[in-house]
Image (tube, rainbow, N blue to C red):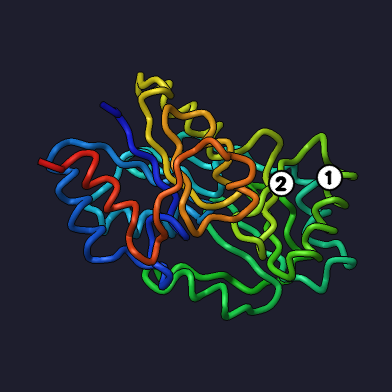
């Protein structure tokens, strides 16, 4: 039997309103009674993720910012991989990318240059919000990730420019087709999970993981069982043709799958 269940949030465990459904809360409460450990791994900021963890009755380790930060069950930061400050500054001040929305996750906050109300719809439960600042004043330290929000084709162009200039210092991925995420080289949910598993004394083969975005790719490929959502990014499905595909997040399919696996009978 699996010793750890790891789950992405948006498009996976959360419903389309970015909330935990009642059925999901019920199933996960029953799993907790049976000592089934659940870990959340998301591109979201830690300040945001822990709101959902608290709704689930507490948490173990939490992987946030696509693996750039790991917090323990006491909410202490135990692992952190920040972007090189000079690289971060170049990413957030490039005038050629003014047509997309620039976002900065630091260890304690979220910074933007201008409002983008659509992004706040993802955080209605937690109340986590950005702070509007002049990005030219940011020195680039303690930046966990920079992400750009905009048209997918435009983001692909920016990704190529970033890799051409900083490919030896950054990792890029997409949590959604409209969000290009940039972290320090080697950062991913999968890399963070490997470190957590080692500290917990759990083999990766003993882990079950669920995801739907390209930022879940490394995590899903290295665990014992990786499961892809029906509503997943088509590129993820194409990259992982051998993995099981279950239903979509609208139907709370992760909870249904976990109930069948751990609670049936």
Classed neighbour count for the residue bearing mark 1: other residues with Cα under 10 Å, few (<14), some (14–19), many (≥20)? some
- Spot occupied by residue 239 in the image (x, y as percentages of width and height): 63, 41
- Spot occupied by residue 88 in the image (x, y as percentages of width and height): 76, 50
> Badge 2 is on which residue?
172
User: Do the residues bearing badges 2 and 1 touch, measured as CB atoms within 8 Å?
Assistant: yes
Quick check: 197 left or right of 142?
left
- Spot occupied by residue 10 in the image (x, y as percentages of width and height): 46, 59
Residue that lies at the very extreme toward the left in this rendered image? 265
In which quarter of the view is residue 202 placed? top left
Q: CA distance from mark 2 to mark 1?
A: 8 Å
In which quarter of the view is residue 261 placed? top left
Position of residue 16 relative to residue 175, above or below, is below
Instruction: Check the picture and name the quadrant holding the C terminus.
Output: top left
Position of residue 52 relative to residue 64, above or below, is below
Classed neighbour count for the residue bearing mark 2: other residues with Cα under 10 Å, few (<14), some (14–19), many (≥20)? many
Say which residue appears at 41% left-offset and 73% top-offset. Answer: 17
Say which residue appears at 29% left-offset and 28% top-offset. Answer: 3
Position of residue 169 relative to residue 128, above or below, is above
* Mark closest to the chain's N terminus, 2 or 1: 1
In this rendered view, identify the residue nearer to me: 129 or 120.
120
- Spot occupied by residue 36 in the image (x, y as percentages of width and height): 22, 37
How many marks can you see? Answer: 2
Position of residue 114 relative to residue 229, above or below, is below
Q: State the SS at label 2.
A: strand
Say which residue appears at 57% left-offset and 80% top-offset. Answer: 117
In this rendered view, identify the residue nearer to me: 66 or 259.
259
> Badge 1 is on which residue?
163
Q: State the SS at label 1.
A: helix
Say which residue appears at 19% left-offset and 44% top-offset. Answer: 31
């Amino acid at each position: 039997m699996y010793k750890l269940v790891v789950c992405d949030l948006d498009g996976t465990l959360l419903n389309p309103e970015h909330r935990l459904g009642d059925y999901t809360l019920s199933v996960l409460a029953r799993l907790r009674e049976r000592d089934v450990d659940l870990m959340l791994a998301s591109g979201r900021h830690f300040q945001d993720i822990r709101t959902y963890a608290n709704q689930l009755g507490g948490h173990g380790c939490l992987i946030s910012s696509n693996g750039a930060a790991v917090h323990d069950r006491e909410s202490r930061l135990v692992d952190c991989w920040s972007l090189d400050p000079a690289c971060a500054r170049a990413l957030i001040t490039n005038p050629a990318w003014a047509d997309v929305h620039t976002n900065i996750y630091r260890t304690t906050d979220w910074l933007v240059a201008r409002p983008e109300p659509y992004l706040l719809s993802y955080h209605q439960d937690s109340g986590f919000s950005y702070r509007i600042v002049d990005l030219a004043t940011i020195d680039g330290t303690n930046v966990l990730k920079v992400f750009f929000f905009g048209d997918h084709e435009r983001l692909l162009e920016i990704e190529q420019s970033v890799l051409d200039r900083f490919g030896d210092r950054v990792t890029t991925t997409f949590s959604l087709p409209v969000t290009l995420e940039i972290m320090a080289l080697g950062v991913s949910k999968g890399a963070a999970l490997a470190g957590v598993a080692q500290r917990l004394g759990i083999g990766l083969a003993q882990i079950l993981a669920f995801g739907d975005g390209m930022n879940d790719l490394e995590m899903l490929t290295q665990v014992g069982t990786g499961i892809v959502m029906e509503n997943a990014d088509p590129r993820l499905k194409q990259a992982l043709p051998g993995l099981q595909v279950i239903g979509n997040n609208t139907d709370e399919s992760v909870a249904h799958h976990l109930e069948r696996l751990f609670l049936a009978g």
